[in-house]
Amino acid sequence: MNEFLGVRVTNDQDATEFDVFNVEDILFIDSFSPKRGYKVPRFHTTKGIFTVLLTLEECKKALDLNQFDIGIIGFFEKIDYVKETPFALTAYFKNSPYTANIAKSRRDLVKHLIV
């Protein structure tokens, strides 16, 4: 069963309600324009109308993520270790080749992970 995380579509511009729905819940899909020249899918389901998460702020709220740096959010608990240089803090993740920058202002939150 394929699940989707969606933002409930309301008349309110702020995404405040998130929910999971299944492929089986979808009645039909159309598109709408949250802003000019930008079309995104809108899922009409048995649970209501949803769209996809469109911003990092929506992702942060829906998934309870932490701010790493400007434009970067993630889970601190998934960081294996952090390397510090004079210019950056770089997070290395458990069982992953990926890295992410962490703002120097967030150093106190990851200082126990610095190697």
Image (cartoon, rainbow, N blue to C red):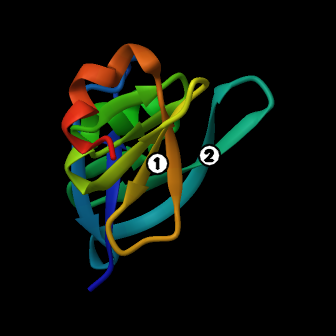
Tell me the kind of residue under disc 1: Val
Depth check: 61 or 76 in front? 76
Q: Is residue 55 visible?
A: no
Circles 1 and 2: CB distance less than 8 Å?
Answer: yes
> SS of the residue at dot 2?
strand
For disc 1, the marked residue is 52
Left or right of residue 113: residue 89: right
Within 10 angstroms of label 2, few (less than 14), some, or many (20 or more) residues?
some
Depth check: 39 or 58 in front? 58
Q: Is residue 75 visible?
A: yes
The quarter of the rendered structure image containing the N terminus is bottom left
**Residue at point 61%, 39% (across, down):** 32
For disc 2, the marked residue is 40
Tell me the kind of residue under disc 2: Val
**Residue at point 32%, 52% (across, down):** 81
Residue 106: which quarter of the image? top left
> SS of the residue at dot 1?
loop
Depth check: 26 or 83 in front? 83
Within 10 angstroms of label 1, few (less than 14), some, or many (20 or more) residues?
some
Residue 115 spot, x, y in % from top left:
33, 47
Residue 17: which quarter of the image? top left
Depth check: 22 or 62 in front? 62
Q: How many marks?
A: 2
**Residue at point 51%, 45% (across, down):** 100
Left or right of residue 4: residue 17: left
